[in-house]
Amino acid sequence: MTEELTLLFSSIPNVLFVIASAVALISAMLTVTRHNAVHALLYLVITMMAISLIFFLLGASFAAALQIIVYAGAIMVLFVFVTMMLHQGESTIIQEKQLYQPSKSLGAAVLCVILLAETLFLLSPLTGEEPINLSIADTAANVSGNIGAREIGLTLFGPYLLLVEISALLLLTALIGAFHLGRRHQESEL
Amino acid sequence: MIPQEFVLFFSLALFCIGVFGVLVRRNLLFILISIEIMLNAVAVLFVAASHYHNSGDGQIMYLLILTLAASEVAVGLGLLIQMYRRTHTLDVDRLSSMKG
Amino acid sequence: MDHQTLTKLLLAVPLLPLFSATLLILAPLFSIKLPKQLVALLAVGSMATAALCTAFLHQGLGDLTEPVIQHVYGTWMQVGSFSVAFGFHLDALSLVMISIITGVGTLIHLYSVGFMDQDKDFQRYFAYLNLFVAAMLILVLADNLLLLFLGWEGVGLCSYLLIGFWHSETNNNQAANKAFLMTRIGDTGMAIGMFLLVYQFGTLDIQQIQISAAELWPLSNSSAPYAFDMVTICCLLLLAGAVGKSGQLPLQSWLPDAMAGPTPVSALIHAATMVTAGVYLIARCHALFELSPLAMQCVAAIGAITLFIAASAALVQSDVKRILAYSTISQIGYMFLALGAGAYSAAVFHLMTHAFFKALLFLSAGALIYCMHHEHNIFRMGGLRKKLPLVWGCFLVGCAALASLPLMSGFFSKELILEKLLDNHMYGYWVVAIAGAFLTAFYSFRLLFVIFEGETKKEPDMQPTKTMIVPLSVLALLAIFGGIQPQGLVALFQPTAGQEHNIGIIAFTIAVPICAVLFSFIQFKRGVFGRELKSVTLMRVRDFLYSGWAFDWFYQKFFVKPFVTLAESNKNDIIDQASIALINFSRLLNKLFSRLQTGSLRWYSGSLVLFSVAALGFLIIT
C-alpha cells in the first residue's frame, strides 16, 4: 500500500494526473446528481476540461486539443442550447426534485460499485496477470509515448484514409437525421 | 510514463459513474448527459492505450468516438425535442406504449 | 391327366370366382354398366366352371397312386430364413371341402338370381358372393397357415359385407359389426398361435409343422397327460380362432344376429361354408392337436356344451331363420365334439351332410319368406302344406335329415359320430350328444308342424320361381342320398379300430329321434307351441332360453360397459395431458417473458447492467 502511495506522488506528471482525475471524478459525480440541468451541464464541461488535461499528460496533444474544441466547445454548446429551449426555470427544478431522489438510488449505487470492482479485477495488472504487452523495442526507457499531431496526420492520410470518408458519411447521416427529427410537423400531433 | 493502474482505475470509475447516472435519472436529458460521461471514459482508455503502445491507432479511434458522439448527440437531442413536443414532459417513464 | 393339367385346374378353381368378383367390382368404377343377365351369367358361370374343374380334379386325384397334389405357384414373401409361398395342397379333405363349396355354392348362386331379382344392388351382391367363394377356396386349399389366414380374413370381410348388405337399416350394420368384432377376437388368438408356431419352427407350412411338432413334442404316455405345455398353448390359440369363426362357445352370439343378411347368404356363409372353416382348421392340423390331449378335451368340451346350449335355445325361438341359426351352432358343436374325440372323418362327413341339409333348409326358408311376403315369424304362418307343396316337401326332407331320421344323410353322419364317441369311451359326452339329438329332432319338427300344419293364418302371395325350384330339388336329393361315405376321407384319417357295439345301444340311438318327433307331434296337437305361458318361472326360463342363455346380456354387462366407461373416463388421457402440458408450459413461458417487456427504458437499461454484472461475475468465478 505504501509502495503505491510513493509511486503516486513520485513525479510531477503523476501528481498532476492524480489532481486531474480527482477533479474529473468529483465533477462527474456532481453532474449526475444535480437537479438543475444547467448546473449539471457546467459540471460536465469541467469534467471534459479535466479529461483534456489528462490527455496532455498522456502525451496526446492532438486528442487534448480536439477534446476541448469539439467536445467541450461544440457538443456541450448543443446541449446548452437545447436545455435553453426546454428549461422553464423553477418549475422544472421542482419537477426534477420529484423525479430524482438520491435516497432511492441505493440499489443502482451498489450495482455500479460491483461493476467497478469486477471490471477492475478482470482488467487490472494488480491481479498478478501480466501487464499490457508492450513490444520489446518500446520498453526502452527513452520511449516517451507522446504522439503528436504530425504523426496522427500521417496515419490518417496513410493507412486510415477510408476511415475519414466513413466518418464523413456518418456525420452526413446524422445531419440529415437530426434535421428531419427536429422538424415541426404541419399535421396534428399524434 | 504514468503507471497503467492509475489510468485504468480512473477510466473505469468514470464509466461506472456514467452507468449510475443512466440507471438512476428519469429525465431524458440527464440520461443523455450520463451517456456522454460514459463515452468520455472509453475515450480516455483508448488514448491511454495509444500512449502505452506508442502508436497513433488509439487516437484515431478517439477521433471516431468523437464523430460518433457528435452525431449521436445531434440525433438524440432531436428526439428529445420531439418527445417534449408530444408529451410536454421529459419523464422517460411516460414512454411505455411499447409494453407487452 | 398329367401333373401339369392338374395343377392348372387346381389354380383355376379359386381364380375363376376371384376373376368374376374383380370384374363385377371394377365395372362400376370405370362407369361400365353391365346388364343383369350378364352379371348373373358371369357369377353363376364362374361358379359352375369352378365346380366342373373340381369334378375333373376328383377324377384326376383318383388316378394318382397317392391322392395328394401339392404345388407351389410362387413366393409370397421371404424374410431371412422365413419364407411363405403361394402353395395349394389338395388331398381328400380339401377335395371334399372344395366340392361342397363349389357345388353347393353354384346352387346357391343360381337360387340367388331368382331371390335377388328385384333388388337394386344385384351386381354388388354377386361381386361380394363371388369374392367370398374365392377367399373360402383359398382358405381350404392353402398349404401354409399364412395363406389360410388370408382366406380366413377374406371370408370374415365378405361375411361383414354381406350381413350388412342392406346397409340403410342400422340393425343390419350393427349385426355386421358384431359378427366382425367377435370373429376378430378369435382371429387375434389365432394370429398369436401362428406367431408362436413360427417362433418354434421357423415356418408356417402345415405339413412341415406337423412333422416338426411330432419330433419336438413327442406324445408320451407319461403321468401328466393333461399337461399345459407349449403345444397345448399353440393348439388352444388356434382353437380360439376356430371358435370365433365357427360360432362356438364363447363367441357364438354373433350367428343368430347374422341372419339380418339375405337368406342365400345365410345359406352359403352361415350354414355351409364359413362356419365350417373352424372345423376344417382343426381337421387340417389334427396331427398337431393330437400331441396335446388337453387341447382335444377342450375341443370336445366346447363342442358338447355349445351343442346343448344352442339346441335348448332353438326350442323357443319364433323367427324361422333364428331357429336355423341356433341349429347350425348346435350341429357344428357336434362336429367339434367329433374332432375332440379323434373322429376326424366322422366330423368332416357330418360337415358335408350338414352343408346339404342346412343349405336346403335355409333356401326353403328363403322361398317361404319370399312367398309369404317377407314374414319371418312362424307363429303367423300355419297350414301351408297344401298351399306351398314344394316348400313343404323341401322342409320335410331337410328337417328329417337334421333330426337324423333313418336313411337320411344326416342319420349316417350323426350315427357315425355317436359310434366313435363310444369307441373312445367318452360316455359323458355320448349322453350329452344323445340329449342334443333328442332336442334337435324335437325343435326341427316343431318348426315343420307350426309352419305347415294347423290352420292358415296368412295366405302366401306367390309361388317360388323356377330359379329357386331347381337348386332346392337338387339339394333335396343330396340331403337324402348324400350319406354315401367318401372312401378317400376314411383313408386320410387313420380309422380307429371299430368295436362291436351292443345291438341295444344302436337301436336306442336310432329310436331317440323318432321318439322326439312323436313327442313333438303330441305337443303340437296339444297346442303347446306358441302358447302364452301362465307361470312366472316358466316365462323366465323361456326368456332365458330365447336370449341364447343370456350371453349378450353377460357380454354387455361385463365387457362392453366397463370398456366404454373406461374409455369415457380416459378422455383426457395421459398422452393428451402430456401434449397439453407442453402447450401450457410454452404459454407460461410466454407470460413470464412478456412481463419483461415493460416498455420502460430504465427497466431495459437496468436489466442490461444487471446482466453484464452477472456475466462478469460468472467470468471471474470460473
Image: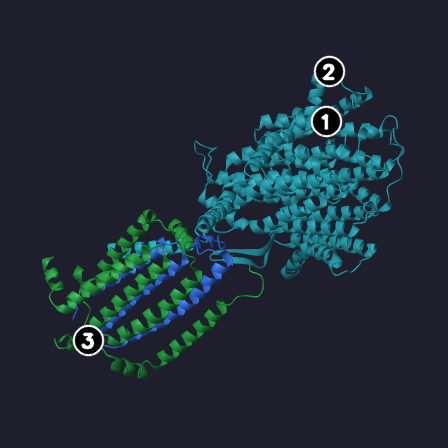
Chain colours: A green, B blue, C cyan
Residue at 57% x, 28% y: name it.
Answer: C426
Q: Nearer the viewer, mark 1 or mark 3?
A: 3
Residue at 32% x, 49% y: name it.
Answer: A102
Badge 1 marks a residue whose secondary structure is loop
How crowded is the residue under tag 3: few (<14 C-alpha within 10 Å), some, or many (20+)?
many
Badge 2 marks a residue whose secondary structure is loop
User: CB under 8 Å between callouts 3 and 2?
Assistant: no
How crowded is the residue under tag 2: few (<14 C-alpha within 10 Å), some, or many (20+)?
few
Look at mark 2 in the image and give the residue it sits on: C535
- As drawn, is A91 to the left or to the right of A17? right
Name the residue nearer the viewer: C565 or A86.
A86
Residue C506 visible in image: no
Q: Is residue A40 above or below residue B62?
A: above
How crowded is the residue under tag 1: few (<14 C-alpha within 10 Å), some, or many (20+)?
many
Disc 3 residue type? Gly
Write down the quadrant of residue C495 in the picture.
Answer: top right
Look at mark 3 in the image and give the residue it sits on: A145
Q: Chain of mark 1?
A: C
User: CB under 8 Å between callouts 2 and 1?
Assistant: no
Residue C584 screen position, x and y as percent: 49, 46
Residue at 79% x, 55% y: name it.
Answer: C39
Residue C533 screen position, x and y as percent: 76, 19
Q: CA distance from mark 2 to mark 1?
A: 18 Å
Residue B62 screen position, x and y as percent: 30, 72
The residue furthest top is C535
Write down the quadrant of residue A138 in the picture.
Answer: bottom left
Q: Nearer the viewer, mark 3 or mark 2?
A: 3
Mark 2 or mark 1, earlier in chain: 1
Name the residue nearer the viewer: B86 or C482.
B86
Residue C315, labelled with which disc?
1
Disc 1 residue type? Leu
